[in-house]
Image (cartoon, grey):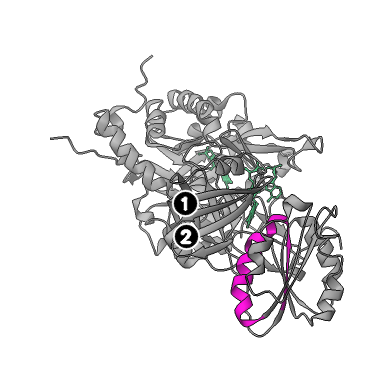
């Protein structure tokens, strides 16, 4: 974990409010594991004040990629970065996705949740049978499909909520059938809370080993401020930044189940 | 040749190598920051507020960023006094910098119990009494909102402990200097201020407050002018040292607080945004003092020209 100023190589608009940021960050690129995240801030100014958390999309020394959606002032400032601009970077942070070999793994991504899932595919595909379910609101929210095709996935299932591209439906629509058909042993998912809640309802307790990568509002990203609390089934709070962001699905107290 | 700059600070009961003290709740238990810089560079540091028993804290959301500020409603989550003792032993083994414990309590009895636990630890240099904790017996009001309560509590702690006592004031009361004076009369060795300002954030979509407790504490650059005013007023009123804080993010900010009367400062929210902030602020302080021909902070302390 390091707090440094890095240089923007490219900040590419993908579609709608989605961007791909490429930064030159040698320490991060060397040390970031799949599932880790980084805290980013566009300038050393005071508004926005705090850095914002983003999953690591990919690394290739000395570069790191972050795929992000503009939702407020922190991400809007990041979207304004141009090549050669400085960017404040803290990372790598958090725990990693567990390592597997020889498993049938189903990855599930909702919207921008594809970011850490992409890095997981790169990690898992060489030594496992990897399947992907990827869904988003509509056509412009479901990006990077061409990039995903080159990663060695056994099969990819794509959905949009409104049916404007691929199949109409949610990531949960066919998940039980997909798990049965492909003898899935492990699932790893990342997406909005509502997606996790439906997922926990559909696949919690059907025998697969289920992992989730959570989002939370974060103040520091490294465990000191207690901002990022998530309730566990043991009725305790855990810190998403330093106890996670990767948790066993059964460990989290989902709202709806 | 330029005169050498002396950053050291004498609080009477302790000497600090410089005036930079990371504030409670924004610096974890210290040890987490050793990954970023050696804790030895600091003047001192304050640990996250501690109650007797472990506390879960408030339900999320716990933070909300505002214009150059941060609202928090963490709810003083923490591991309890027994666990903190172990953490302090670990932290003390990696640094010689004075450690300050931020003592919390839901009642006067709990404040005293917690203060006594850390009073006997040789690894602890100063107790900071966080009198901004909601008090169950005072209908949720905190001691800092009542000069008589502050006097009673501080006196009781001073009579039963040996270590220097820093009393941390809340800005959420109409007469802060009067509360400061009450703390001094009860035997406080120094005053620190400000804790966070109560504020409200509104969720327009839900037409509801963002926080379940409605009120949350505002910190960060947004509060700096308000904090400077209160530090100035309190420093004029009391004769014991005053540790100023509220929105400090630069070496220049430190000097502004010293000019209005602070002997040293605490840095809060900036540590969350920029873990290495202390390193930068100490460097900037030295550079700014050099540029302004200040060799020692005592030359300008409280010397605001009116
Ligand atoms: C571990 C982790 C990994 C992440 N990875 C990515 C990623 O790879 N790509 C990406 O685009 N985003 C990612 N996010 C989300 C991203 O951090 C937020 O979208 C960003 O912080 C928003 O900042 P902002 O200043 O633009 O919006 P703000 O102005 O802070 O917020 C805009 C609105 O969104 C709400 N909001 C923001 N974040 C959250 C949250 N976590 N939970 C609930 N409400 C929220 C705010 O309350 C507000 O209403 C990740 C978050 C975490 C914790
Ligand atoms: C997340 C957070 C947690 C805090 N926890 C404590 C605490 O446990 N005890 C305390 O006395 N003050 C606590 N504070 C207040 C700070 O120590 C400080 O008084 C305040 O933030 C103002 O300084 P700043 O503007 O530099 O942040 C906390 C502040 C923040 C932002
Ligand atoms: S974001 Fe500060 S503890 Fe997790």
- Asked whether the residues under the numbered discs 2 and 1 touch, taking CB atoms below 8 Å apart as contact, a structural biologist would say yes
- In the image, residue B306 sits, relative to residue B80, either above or below, namely above
The residue where tag 1 is placed is: A9
Q: Main secondary structure of the magenta part?
A: helix
Confirm whether the magenta stretch covers residue B46: no
Which chain letter matches label 2? A
Kindly tell me whether residue A225 is visible in this rendering: no
Residue at the farthest bottom position? A102
- Residue positioned 67% across, 33% down in the render: B199
Q: Secondary structure at mark 1?
A: strand
Q: Secondary structure at mark 2?
A: strand
Q: Which residues are magenta?
A: A105-128
Separation of marks 2 and 1 at Cα, in angstroms: 9 Å
Front one among B200 and B236: B200
Residue A27 falls left or right of residue B113: left
Image quadrant containing the N terminus of chain B: top left
From the top left corner, tell me how far across and down residue A37 is, in percent: 57, 59
The residue where tag 2 is placed is: A63
Q: Quadrant of residue B55?
A: bottom right
Kindly tell me whether residue B52 is visible in this rendering: yes
From the top left corner, tell me how far across and down residue A241 is, in percent: 60, 59
The lab-note entry on whether marks 2 and 1 share a chain reads yes
Which chain letter matches label 1? A
Image quadrant containing the C terminus of chain B: top left
Residue at the farthest left position? B1
From the top left corner, tell me how far across and down residue B176 is, in percent: 56, 27
- Residue positioned 67% across, 38% down in the render: B216
């Amino acid at each position: 974990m390091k707090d440094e100023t890095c240089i923007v190589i490219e900040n590419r608009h993908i579609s709608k409010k989605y961007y791909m940021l490429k930064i030159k960050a040698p320490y991060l690129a060397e040390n970031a594991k799949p599932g880790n995240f980084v805290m980013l801030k566009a300038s050393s100014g005071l508004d926005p004040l705090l850095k914002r958390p983003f999953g690591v999309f990919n690394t290739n020394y000395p570069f790191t990629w972050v795929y992000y959606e503009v939702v407020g002032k922190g991400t809007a400032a990041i979207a304004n970065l141009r090549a050669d601009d400085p960017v404040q970077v803290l990372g790598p942070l958090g725990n990693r996705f567990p390592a597997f070999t020889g498993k049938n793994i189903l990855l599930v991504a909702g919207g921008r949740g594809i970011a850490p899932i992409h890095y997981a595919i790169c990690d898992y595909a060489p030594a496992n049978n990897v399947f992907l379910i990827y869904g988003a609101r509509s056509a412009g929210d479901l990006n990077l499909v061409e990039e995903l095709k080159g990663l060695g996935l056994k099969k990819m299932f794509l959905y949009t909520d409104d049916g404007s591209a691929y199949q109409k439906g949610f990531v949960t629509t066919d998940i039980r059938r997909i798990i049965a058909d492909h003898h899935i042993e492990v699932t790893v998912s990342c997406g909005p809370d509502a997606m996790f809640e439906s997922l926990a309802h559909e696949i919690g307790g059907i025998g697969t080993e289920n992992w989730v990568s959570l989002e939370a509002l974060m103040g520091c990203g490294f465990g000191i401020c207690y901002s990022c609390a998530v309730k566990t089934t043991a009725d305790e709070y855990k810190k998403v930044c330093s106890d996670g962001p990767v948790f066993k699905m059964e460990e989290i107290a989902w709202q709806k189940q | 040749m330029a005169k050498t700059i002396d950053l050291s600070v004498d609080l009477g009961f302790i000497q600090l190598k410089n005036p930079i003290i990371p504030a409670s709740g924004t610096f974890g238990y210290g040890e987490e920051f050793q990954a970023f810089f050696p804790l030895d560079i600091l003047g001192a540091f304050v640990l996250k507020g501690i109650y007797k028993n472990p506390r879960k804290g408030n339900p999320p959301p716990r933070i909300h960023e505002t214009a150059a500020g941060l609202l928090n409603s963490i709810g003083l989550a923490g591991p309890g006094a027994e666990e903190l003792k172990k953490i302090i032993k670990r932290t003390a083994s990696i640094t010689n910098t004075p450690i300050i414990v931020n003592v919390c309590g839901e009642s006067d009895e709990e404040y005293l119990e917690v203060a006594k636990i850390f009073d006997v630890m040789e690894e602890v240099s100063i107790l900071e009494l966080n009198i901004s904790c909601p008090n169950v017996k005072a209908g949720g009001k905190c001691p800092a909102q009542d000069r008589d309560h502050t006097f009673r509590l501080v006196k009781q702690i001073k009579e039963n402990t040996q270590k220097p006592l820093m009393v941390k004031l809340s800005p959420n009361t109409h007469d802060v200097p009067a509360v400061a004076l009450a703390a001094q009369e009860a035997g406080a060795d120094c005053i620190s201020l400000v804790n966070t300002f109560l504020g409200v954030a509104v969720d327009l979509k839900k037409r509801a407050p963002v926080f379940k407790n409605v009120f949350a504490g505002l910190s960060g650059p947004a509060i700096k002018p308000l904090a400077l005013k209160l530090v100035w007023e309190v420093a004029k009123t009391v004769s014991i040292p005053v540790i100023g804080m509220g929105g400090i993010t630069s070496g220049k900010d430190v000097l502004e607080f010293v000019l209005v009367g602070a002997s040293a400062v605490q840095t809060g929210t900036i540590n969350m945004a920029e873990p290495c902030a202390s390193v930068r602020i100490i460097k900037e302080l030295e550079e700014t003092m050099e540029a302004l021909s200040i060799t020692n902070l005592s030359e300008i302390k409280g010397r605001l020209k009116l």
